[in-house]
Image (spheres, rainbow, N blue to C red):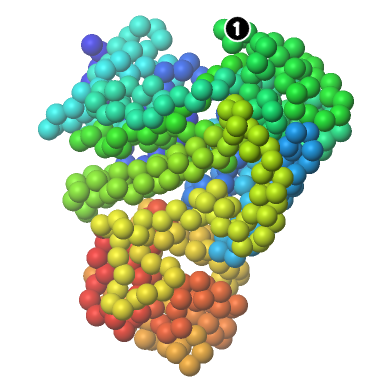
Amino acid sequence: MGSKTKPDVLIIGAGPTGLMLALELSLQNIPFRIIDSSPSRSPYSRAFAIHARSLELLSRHEGILPSLIKRGTFNLSVNLFSNKKPVFTLNLQDTPFKDTMFPGPLFVSQAITEEVMDGALAGYGNAVEWGAEALEVEQDDEGAYVALRRADGSEELVQAKYVVGCDGAHSIVRKSAGLSFEGAVYPQDFILADVQLEWEHKANLHIFIGHYGLLAALPLKNGIFRLVCSRPFETDKETEPTLDDFRAAIKQHVPGKVAISNPIWMTSFRLHHRIASNYRSGRLFLAGDAAHIHSPVGGQGMNTGIQDSVNLGWKLARVLRGKSPDSLLDSYHLERHKVGLAILHGTDRVFEMMATTNPIFLFLRNWLVPWVVPFIMGDAGRRASRMRFVSQLGVRYRNSPVVGNSGSWNGKLRGGNRAADGKLVGSGGETTLIGLLKGPGYHLLLFSGVEDATVSLQVLCEAEKTLIESRHGVTVHKILTAEEKSKEGLVDAEGRLHDWYGFEGPGFVLVRPDGYIGSIGYLEDQDSPVPLA
């Protein structure tokens, strides 16, 4: 073996999940290395949608969001067809969310997302080590050990305090930890191509279902579309797809004349739905596709991996600094495994309905879809409920052992909920709550209350002294309702944040470093410091 190095954390895998963890550890100033067995970035993209919650979390790192927004688009609708007839058009920006600045997903290729995240990582002075393959992973009481081999044949033994496998469905970290990957493969065969399309349909996301399965078309750029479809029954499943296979699929699913040409990339694949039995084994952790894989319905995969990393990053940092016990790391599995299961089950149900090849289910689906989809998605309330799931704004950790509520608190937002966003006005102008929740530490929000229940700034300052033992690692924000006090705090001018958080009287919210509520309650119910995790 060659040299032996000892970073605090070794990240294996440099896709969006691994990159997000690297960014979070950079923010926390934790020594780490991030490696990938590939020689360089792939030009091909799997994921295209960054949902609202992921956009909020990416905004924690300087420059990422403006760059992605500049190179992507929010302006895509979803058009659903059944048996070549239009069924429903969903405007993805038409969601009645009042607690986020991002009502819909941003469509941008994974290749661009990774490029932008690489740039942000470089801004912290860190970079991916390409062409470094993990051959073996072991652990003991002293650390975790990874044998690496580089493209030139040289080898290295890395000792780290923790190893995080962001290395996909065939994760060596998961296999080395002896964790099962429970689930199955879907029976359908699929083919994919990036091709030039000339047709009558606008550049939106189109989904066609019918007697032959499904076909989805997503616009990329310059007339290029990503096609994903059930493999036509008459084609040879043992060979790579051809342009004629896609012509056959288009003829089966798409109305009108369609010209297809200039294939950039074509491949075939099968889909799995699986989840790891545990996201932690001692010093080894799993995140992203190494922990869970599911159908591409709703574009959940990359977004779930990004949020795995944000959940894990701050916990690793607190334990490594000795600020929290090792048991805090157990909450990673407790919080994120439930989310992974919910997404796996939710996407599985929709995918089985959309891609079924069972003749009976096909008949029922094709008969029901033109009625059921407009009924569900045509109603603003029902649409919001489903889009909150897809956007991952609804993810919460209420039963986690490291969140809680104070005293008699029974508001609509509780410990474990995402911290809702909203506009604020301060002496420096307008900002947002999510914009305040940056940095590596906790944030304490002190709400003055509304109308007759309002308290003075002096009372909030006294409450601050009671609620936190030390200002170190906790940033305090005073949120007021009286505009004349804007120089001394932040004004919730429209009262929406007080309403969202449920504060008629003065209250507090302790927000964790990952943007979720650690504790919440009325000031009068809390007469001792709020515990940090």
User: In the rendering, at what x and y percent does residue 428 appear?
Assistant: 57, 70
Residue shown at 45%/90% (left/top)? 453
If the image is split into quadrants, where does the C terminus sit?
bottom left
User: In the rendering, at what x and y percent does residue 471 appear?
Assistant: 30, 67
Q: Is residue 227 above or below residue 74?
A: above
Please indicate whether residue 211 sits to the left or right of residue 471 in the image. Answer: right
Q: Nearer the viewer, residue 242 or 312?
A: 242
The residue carrying mark 1 is 239
Q: Nearer the viewer, residue 235 or 29?
A: 235
Q: Amino acid at mark 1?
A: Thr
User: In the rendering, at what x and y percent does residue 400 appear?
Assistant: 30, 56
Please identify the quarter of the rendering in which residue 269 is found. top right
Whether residue 474 can be seen here? no
Is disc 1 surrounded by few (<14), some (14 to 19) or many (20+) residues within 10 Å? Answer: few
Residue shown at 50%/85% (left/top)? 450
If the image is split into quadrants, where does the N terminus sit?
top left
Please indicate whether residue 374 sits to the left or right of residue 479 in the image. Answer: right
Q: State how many labels appear.
A: 1
Please identify the quarter of the rendering in which residue 147 is found. top left
